[in-house]
Image: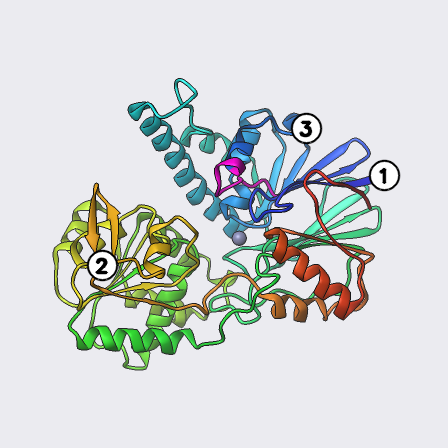
Amino acid sequence: MKTTLRFLGAAGTVTGSKTLLEHGEKRILIDCGLFQGLKDLRLKNRAPFPVQPDSIETVLLTHAHLDHCGYLPLLVKNGFSGEIHCTVPTKGLAGIILKDSGKIQEEEAERANRHGYTKHQPAEPLYTVKDVEECLPFFATHQYHEWVILDEFSKFQFRNAGHILGSAMVELRVEGKTILFTGDLGRQHPILLAPPETVPQADVLILESTYGNRLHSDNNAKEELAEIIRETFEKKGILLIPTFAVERAQEILYLLSELKAEDRLPGIPVYLDSPMGVSVTELMMDLPGWQDLSKEEIAAIEKVVYLVTDVKTSKMVVADTRPKIVLAGSGMITGGRILHYLDKYISDERNTVLLVGFQAAGTRGRSLEEGAEEVKFFGQYHRIKAEIRKITSLSAHADRSEIMAWLKKFEKAPRQVFINHGEPHASDALRVKIQHELGWNCQVAQPDQFYTV
Ligand SMILES: [Zn+2]
């Protein structure tokens, strides 16, 4: 029987990961992500799905980031009723992240209707929290390396991708041929996780390329963090860290726990003020075997931080002007509780705002990164007097050299490599590099391209 791949998303862009595999009549969808970012992309989430959702038998999910799982509630709402296979932590994380996404969709639609800035009357959320709740029972969970039989011709297993908690590559065997989807590939030395697994061979490889044309800085994140804490503490200031709830917050907490163990965290309280960040941190604590951390290391993280979820405590922490370290969402300062801290502290030069992740164009985080003198939120402009610092070495994605090092461990060349999940110039730079250095058959996946395996 013929096996065909079809690139429905993350082709020519970094979001909307969806690859359809057809084998005879059977349809398997690998990842089911939301398109995010610019409006043209986001509108694609509203377009009819390219095949009938109820004609898809199974979804294989690499990890819980929205650009990989965020379309699932809509797929289910529109008729999909098969199993959504993923690892144990991915189910937990996806539940947290999708509910948050449903809530944001509802709030955005509500705001659009209130202010009348919508062409659709009334504006409808893409999906609601209720849609998310209806989607979660379809999840089926697995361990890494557990072969799951789909039918007499096909089976798959998940392999550790080292990207975020529970993240996996999908190794799919169809009639003896191996098709490997990297999903998002982690660093060679992730802070909390085991590094991406070595894979001996694949006939067809679908490879991500977010950083296909870039190298991460090799500064030591812990030393940079220690230095920034010391400087802020000497000024008797407050250190504010806008942070993503998944992985980055826990990485920073881990680095702080190490500094504490080394006596380099001078008696300053650390707060994680983010309901979602707290849920993810608690999930991580509950799943010790899925990380490269000992029980003692996990216990040390628990001890270094005060977890804040309720609004009353959050207000008390904001109001307390003594030196402290606060991690709060959102990571690019597009919203969330970090705004309340900035409102109180950004106009005081003793304080420091530390950026620890990628800041997309158009976000307040990017403005701060680019040295803006003021920033607008809560309906007014705030003068930026606090020091703005950043740590650039933290990333959950392998860079170009790490991707190449991982590829070089293959025992033989895949028959075909497809590069996806990257901006076009990043994907193409990686293609050139792979062809030049490894001599492999390699092409950049195009939107809606078909390929017969
Ligand atoms: Zn990801």
For the point 39% across and 61% down, the residue is 250
Q: Amino acid at mark 3?
A: Val
Q: Is residue 133 above or below residue 343?
A: above
Point out residue 28 in the picture as x, y percentages from the top left corner: 70, 38
Whole-angstrom CA distance, mark 3 to mark 1, is 18 Å
For the point 37% across and 78% down, the residue is 223
Assign a secondary structure to mark 3.
loop
**Would residue 235 be found to the left or right of residue 181 on screen?**
left
Q: Quadrant of the N terminus?
A: top right
Whole-angstrom CA distance, mark 3 to mark 2, is 50 Å
Question: Which residue is the site of mark 3?
Answer: 51
Question: Which residue is the site of mark 2?
Answer: 384
- Which comes sooner in the sequence, label 3 or label 2? 3
Q: Mark 1 against mark 2, which lies toward the viewer?
A: 2
**Would residue 212 be found to the left or right of residue 248 on screen?**
right
Type of secondary structure dominating the magenta stretch: loop
Assign a secondary structure to mark 2.
loop
Q: Callout 2: 10 Å neighbours few (<14), some, many (20+)?
A: many
Q: Mark 3 against mark 1, which lies toward the viewer?
A: 3
- Which comes sooner in the sequence, label 3 or label 1? 1
Q: Is mark 3 within 8 Å of ligand 1?
A: no
* Extent of the magenta region: 31-41
Q: Does the segment drawn in magenta span residue 36?
A: yes
Point out residue 387 in the picture as x, y percentages from the top left corner: 25, 67
- Which comes sooner in the sequence, label 1 or label 2? 1
Whole-angstrom CA distance, mark 1 to mark 2, is 60 Å
Quarter of the view holding residue 140? top right
Q: Amino acid at mark 2?
A: Ile
Question: Which residue is the site of mark 1?
Answer: 2
